[in-house]
Every structure is written in C-alpha cells, then in structure tokens.
Image (spheres, helix red, strand yellow):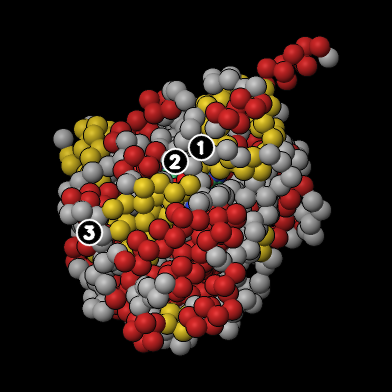
C-alpha cells in the first residue's frame, strides 16, 4: 500500500489536505491530512469516499462521438486521434467561414487547481476565440468588499477562536465551509455565541444559538438598521472611527436616519425589537466576528448588500480587537505568477467577451459572428447555468459543434458532438490555493489515468499541436509549468516554506504582523464613504424579484458540490429535489407534504417533491442542490427557474433573486390526461 498526500480539487473554500492510500494503482482510501493547518485531518462526507468517484463505473473512459439526436446521450467510442482530428477539422472550417470568435470556451471550477483550471486560456488566446467572463459565483461580493476595504488582506479565520460573537451571515457553513467549525467549536467552549442570519433555518441552524430569518435580498437594510441603533445609542467606537474610518459622519447624517428599526422591520421581516437587540449585542461584544457567505450577493443588489454589511465592523472598531472583524473571502492571487499559465500575451488582438451567466442568450440570439462551436471543460452549464430552458435550447442547435471534456455523462455531455474523457485530481498534477484560508499545496498524480482519460492540460497541448499553434509553451508538461512557477516565486511565496511546498506538504502563506488594521484603500482608511463609487455612500436597494408568490432560495446541498457528486448514488439516493414550504403557505394552497408540486415562473416549470416545514418562513420556498436531470422528478431542474439577469456590480449571477408560483403537479398530470 502506498500513502500519498493530495488536495481536494473541488470549488470549496476549505481546499482540504488529503492523505490517499493506493493499492495496485487503485485508490483504496481517502482521509484528511492531520498536518493541514486549516482542515486538520477531517473531511466532509462527500470526499470521505472520493475513491467511489475516481473508480466509479460511470466514469467516461474513452472519447465518444455522437450517434443520435442531441441530448439523447447516444454515442460511439472513437480514438483520441479521431476525436482530435474531428475537432480540428470543424474548428478550421468555422474559423474560415465565421472567424475564431465563433468558438466559445465554457469552463468554471470543476477543479480549482491553478494549472488544470486555467489550462485552456493559452490555446483560446492563441486562436483568437471569444473570451468567457467567468462571473457565475460571487463577483458582486468582491465588489461590495472592495468598495469599503479596497485590497485589504482577508482575515485569518483562526480569529474565530478568539471571538465572543460569531455571526454566520448567509452561509450554510456545515455544508459549504465545514472546517471553520474547528475554531467555532473552540470559541463556543469558551462561551462565544453563534448567530445565523439566513433566509431560512438551514441545517447550520443546529449549531447556532440564535437564528435570524431575513427576507431575501434585504440584508443591506438590516445592516443599516443595526448601524442606526448603534449610532443613536452612542455605541460606536469613536477612537477607532477617528483613526481608521472615512465617512462615518456622512453616513450617520444622510443615510442612517432612513433606517429606523420600524422601517427596517417592514423591509426585512425582522421584528424591530430584535433589530435593536442585535445592534446592542453586536456593539457590546468584546470581539464580534462576521463570516459572510456568498448567497446574499447573488441578487440584483448584491454588491450594495455586501458593502452595507462590510461597514458594520468599522463602526464598532471590531478590526482592532483580537477575534473581531469580517471575513468575506481570501485572495492569494499575489502569491502566484498565474500569467505563466494563462498567457494573455498569446492573444494578438482583443476578442469579444461573453458573460457565462447569459449562455442561453448567447447560444440562441444572433451574434456577430454567431457561436458555432462551444468547448466545455470542467463545468456543467446545462445544469448549473441560469435559465436552463434557454441553455438547453441553445445546446440542441444542430449547427452548434459542441465538445465536452468530462469525467461523467452530465446533462451538458449528453448534448455534445464529441466527449473527451477527463482525469480526476488524483490522476494529474497541480498546485492549489484557497478562497477560504491561506494554505497552498502542490500535488502530483497518485494513480495512473483511469481508462483513456487525459487532463485538461494534456488535451489543450494536443489541440494546440493539431491546430498548428506553434509555441514551445505547449510542449511542456503540467509539472514543468508548476516547477517554473515555483522556481521563480513571488516575494510572498518565497517568504513561505518553499521547500516543503515543492515536496508536496501543505503550507501556509505568512501574514504580515498588524495586517488587520492595514487598510489598503486609496485613503488608507476603511471607506464607508467612497467617492469613486457611483453611490458614494451605501444604502438599501430593493432586489429585483419577479411577479410571483414566493421567493425561491436555491441553496447548496450537503451531499453535492454544485452539480458534482450527482454520480454518487451512495450520497444521493433519497431526498432529491425537495421544495420546502411553510405549513401556512402549504395549507393555503391545499398542498400536502410529500406530494409532487410544480414551481413555475415566466422562464420555466420544475417539478419538486414538497416538504412542508417550519424551517422556511411564509412567502419563501427553498430547494437545496443542483441536480442532474436524470435525478429530477420532472424533466427540468432548478435552473429552469433562475434568471440571466446580472448583479449591480461585477456582472455576476443572480441565482437567488427569483420568485415562483407553486401548484400541485398532480393537476398537471390530470390536465395532460384530459387533453
Ligand atoms: N456542500 C456543498 N458545498 C459547497 C457548494 C455546494 O453546492 N454544496 N458550493 C461551493 C461553492 S461554488 C461556493 S461559491 C461556496 C459558497 O457558497 P455560498 O453561496 O456562500 O453557499 P452558502 O454558504 O450555503 O450560502 C448560501 C446561504 O445563503 C442563504 N441566502 C440566500 N439568500 C440570502 C439572503 O438574501 N440573505 C441571507 N442572509 N442569506 C441568504 C441561503 O439560504 C443559504 O443558506 O460553497 C461551496 N461549497
Ligand atoms: N441554482 C443554482 N445554480 C448554481 C448555484 C446555486 O447556488 N444555485 N451556484 C453557482 C455557483 S456558486 C457556481 S461556482 C457554479 C459552478 O458550476 P461548475 O463549475 O460548472 O460546477 P459543477 O457543477 O461542479 O461542474 C463541474 C464539472 O467538472 C467536471 N470535472 C471535474 N474535474 C475535472 C477536470 O479536471 N477536467 C474536466 N474537464 N472536468 C472536470 C465534473 O465532473 C463536473 O461535471 O454553479 C452555479 N449554479
Ligand atoms: S468538498 Fe470541501 S470540505 Fe469536502 S473535502 Fe473538499 S475541500 Fe474539504
Ligand atoms: Mo461558487
């Protein structure tokens, strides 16, 4: 038996250290790495049996060519030579007729490794293909943070350990960021209180001392209401504000008067007395710490919401207190010279940029040139992109040449003309950083490739050769590229334990002493007032919504990661595609627990299994997880309801800024029979 270190490759802030045991070139066990500084030897239930994904009988093992109708998943195996030749011929014809911008790459974060994730950029830059604006996750969150904090370094999450009030704001931490529980538990043992502020009592509520249920998209008003009370009752930290904050007086005199608790209660659905009490407890805490999720930024007012919340710790001086502050996400971009992977310099002239949230529009509307080929790698847009009906309509276009590089027969792969089999993270090399901590780690393949799988890096090198993109860059291996990055490290990386990193050990990027009050903004202060913003001061803006009865919160599921892990029957056998509804709402509509219901709006209709539960407030319905269509009770999954609208800043997705009506699906069936 061999035991080798690796890293969890999924799009999760934890980026866990793994210890992988292999026997006869097969993975037999996957465990957490006790030496990993953040994850400390534990894993989530998804990865505890990663070997079941790696050696799944559902893995795509050879290249495939379509032999039936698009979407029907009928394919015949072909050789790699045939597959690459087919793509090359199609692309050469398309480029000759429409120009290279008729080719669109589509990728996101099936793997977070820097090399494999970005491996397509050099080729698509070289070809002059359309560029993809990769903003499906949470760019509005970044914009909201930047407006107030600029480039200030993110908190080290071990601050949690010293906090006495930990606010999980719009984050289902037990599912999406479970390793912060190490520090939450130790803080709780020392008396810290935990609050969850969310649109429903998500399963993380069970570790919270207090759950505050807020109306979707109104957290900005809540934050301003809390600041109103804090200012009114003279609970601000005047010394801190004087030294470190710009614009509190302007906020206090021109904005906060509009946010009296009664008015904020109307907007948020939280009782005025609760808002007052929250403000007092927050201001009086020794070291209040806010851990901010991303869900609340996926609204048309997302950046402004995050901006308002980000002002709170400034007003009470939390940053100066050990254990206090606000965590949004870690940015370690400066540690790595990713230009060595992405090679923007390979692009001769600027190509147009298309937004990944608007794939439905892009594929169906006449563009100049139209998109004639889509190359999808480590993403599953047929399931995860908003407005599924439009996306599927586009993917079904007979004249669209679609290539999908995948590990499994996803909803997107079913629409491919050519499928290429992809490696898992244990079959290729990479280097990882995290958006939840300061750990970084290098990995090497642990087992030989399964079947004929190839990594993203290898496939793009093959395609470059076939498309006659002649540059020695494309003759390197992934290891060569990683070695070249580590051979000329940035100052930040060089100041860390570089030898250990090269040897595959998890290491942490060092943080400068006093970083918590080193505010990297134009003024050097926290900018509640920021003249470079269209709105110099934060305020509450209503979310967009739709004309329908219920807000639809479509939150993460513990057992899935976006649409990944749908292949794992051991995780996902039961409770697929539930729609949670409050008992009063269900009674009002004559709906019963366990029955099939249809949620619908102007974009689509989706069948769910109804769960009647008090964990959801009136006027809101909740579904967890992005499911493959084969797991759906009807013929669509959640994203048939979500919209292609973009956020106020950052051109991000607005998955949660959506409303639906709900009816019994039993009637649907009898209608169909009657017709
Ligand atoms: N198990 C699992 N883990 C995951 C993922 C997954 O799908 N499953 N996805 C991964 C990805 S890609 C990401 S980006 C990360 C982080 O993903 P995030 O989007 O930060 O996910 P959560 O942390 O659960 O935050 C979503 C929570 O926000 C709540 N919410 C929605 N609207 C509002 C609102 O207006 N106000 C408030 N206060 N709360 C609101 C939802 O009810 C839900 O509980 O998680 C990653 N980890
Ligand atoms: N309704 C709704 N929709 C959402 C969200 C939501 O909260 N609600 N969350 C959104 C968010 S935050 C995000 S980040 C996006 C994420 O969307 P995606 O990044 O598309 O994530 P996945 O659905 O996990 O799809 C990743 C695919 O990559 C494949 N893969 C894994 N490793 C490799 C590899 O090395 N090479 C190749 N070629 N393939 C590989 C996996 O098999 C998997 O099918 O989804 C978004 N969609
Ligand atoms: S999905 Fe997240 S919590 Fe689970 S093993 Fe991977 S990084 Fe860790
Ligand atoms: Mo994400």
Contact, mark 2 vs mark 1 (Cβ under 8 Å): yes
In this rendering, does residue 354 appear at all? Answer: yes
- Could you give the CA–CA distance between mark 2 and mark 1, rounded to whole angstroms? 6 Å
- Height in image: 589 above or below 480? above
Mark 3 close to ligand 3, CB under 8 Å = no
- Height in image: 186 above or below 424? below
Where in the figure is residue 54, as x and y percent of width and height? 36, 35
Residue 602: quadrant of the picture: top right
**Structural crowding at the residue carrying mark 1, measured as other residues with C-alpha within 10 Å and reported as few (<14), some (14–19) or many (≥20):** many
Nearer the viewer's eye, disc 3 or disc 2? 2
SS assignment at label 3? helix
- The dot on residue 201 is 2
For residue 471, side relative to residue 196 (left or right): right
Residue bearing the label numbered 1: 616
For residue 99, side relative to residue 442 (left or right): right
Labels 3 and 2: the sequence-earlier one: 3
Quarter of the picture holding the C terminus: top right
Residue bearing the label numbered 3: 161
Residue 395: quadrant of the picture: top right
SS assignment at label 2? loop
Labels 2 and 1: the sequence-earlier one: 2
Residue at point 67%, 31% (across, down)? 662
């Amino acid at each position: 038996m061999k035991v080798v270190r690796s890293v969890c490759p999924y799009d999760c802030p934890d980026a866990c250290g793994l210890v992988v045991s292999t026997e006869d070139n097969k993975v037999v066990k996957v465990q957490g790495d006790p030496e990993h500084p953040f994850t400390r030897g534990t894993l989530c239930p998804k990865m505890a049996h990663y070997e079941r994904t790696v050696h799944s009988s559902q893995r795509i093992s050879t290249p495939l060519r379509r032999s039936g109708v698009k979407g029907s998943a009928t394919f015949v195996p072909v050789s790699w030579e045939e597959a690459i030749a087919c793509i090359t011929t199609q692309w050469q014809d398309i480029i000759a007729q429409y120009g290279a911008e008729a080719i669109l790459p589509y990728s996101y974060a099936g793997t977070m490794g820097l090399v494999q994730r970005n491996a397509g950029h050099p080729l698509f830059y070289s070809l002059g293909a359309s560029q993809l604006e990769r903003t499906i996750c949470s760019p509005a969150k970044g914009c909201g943070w930047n407006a107030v904090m600029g480039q200030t370094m993110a908190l080290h999450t071990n601050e949690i350990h010293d906090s006495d009030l930990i606010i999980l704001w719009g984050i289902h931490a037990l599912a999406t960021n479970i390793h912060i529980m190490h520090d939450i538990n130790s803080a709780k043992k020392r008396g810290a209180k935990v609050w969850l502020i969310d649109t429903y009592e998500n399963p993380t509520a069970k570790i919270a001392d207090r759950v505050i249920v807020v109306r979707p998209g109104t957290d900005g008003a809540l934050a301003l209401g809390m600041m109103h009370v804090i200012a009114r009752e003279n609970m601000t930290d005047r010394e801190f504000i004087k030294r470190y904050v710009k614009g509190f007086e302007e906020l206090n005199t021109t904005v906060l008067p509009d946010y009296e608790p009664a008015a904020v209660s109307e907007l948020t659905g939280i009782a005025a007395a609760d808002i007052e009490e929250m403000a007092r407890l927050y201001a009086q805490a020794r070291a209040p710490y806010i851990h901010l999720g991303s869900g609340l930024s996926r609204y048309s007012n997302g950046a402004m919401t995050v901006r308002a919340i980000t002002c709170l710790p400034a007003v009470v001086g939390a940053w100066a207190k050990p254990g206090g502050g606000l965590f949004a996400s870690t940015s370690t971009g400066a540690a790595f010279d990713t230009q060595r992977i992405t090679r923007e310099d390979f692009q001769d002239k600027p190509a147009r940029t298309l937004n990944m949230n608007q794939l439905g529009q892009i594929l169906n509307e006449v563009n100049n040139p139209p998109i004639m080929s889509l190359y999808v790698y480590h993403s599953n847009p047929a399931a995860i992109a908003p407005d599924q009906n439009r996306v599927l309509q586009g993917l079904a276009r007979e004249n669209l040449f679609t290539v999908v590089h995948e590990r499994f027969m996803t909803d997107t792969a079913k629409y491919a003309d050519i499928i290429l089999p992809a490696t898992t993270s244990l079959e290729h090399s990479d280097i990882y950083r995290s958006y939840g901590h300061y750990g970084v780690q290098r990995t090497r393949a642990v087992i030989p490739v399964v079947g004929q799988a190839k990594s993203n890096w290898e496939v793009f090198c093959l395609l470059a050769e076939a498309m006659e993109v002649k540059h020695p860059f494309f003759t390197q291996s992934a290891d060569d590229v990683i070695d070249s990055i580590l051979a000329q490290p940035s100052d930040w990386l060089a100041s860390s334990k570089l030898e250990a990193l090269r040897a595959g050990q998890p290491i942490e990027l060092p943080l400068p002493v006093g970083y918590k009050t080193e505010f990297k903004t134009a003024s050097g202060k926290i900018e509640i007032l920021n003249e470079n913003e269209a709105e110099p001061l934060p305020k509450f803006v209503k979310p967009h919504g739709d004309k329908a009865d219920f807000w639809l919160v479509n939150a993460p599921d513990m057992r899935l990661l976006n649409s990944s892990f749908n292949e794992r029957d051991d995780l996902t056998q039961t409770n697929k595609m539930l729609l949670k509804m409050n008992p009063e709402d269900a009674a009002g509509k004559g709906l019963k627990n366990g029955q099939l219901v249809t949620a619908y709006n102007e974009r689509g209709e989706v069948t769910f299994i109804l769960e009647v539960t008090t964990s959801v407030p009136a006027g809101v319905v909740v579904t967890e997880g992005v499911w493959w269509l084969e797991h759906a009770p009807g013929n669509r999954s959640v994203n048939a309801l979500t919209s292609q609208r973009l956020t106020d800043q950052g051109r991000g997705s607005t998955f949660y800024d959506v409303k639906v009506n709900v009816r019994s699906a039993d009637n649907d069936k009898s209608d169909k029979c009657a017709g």
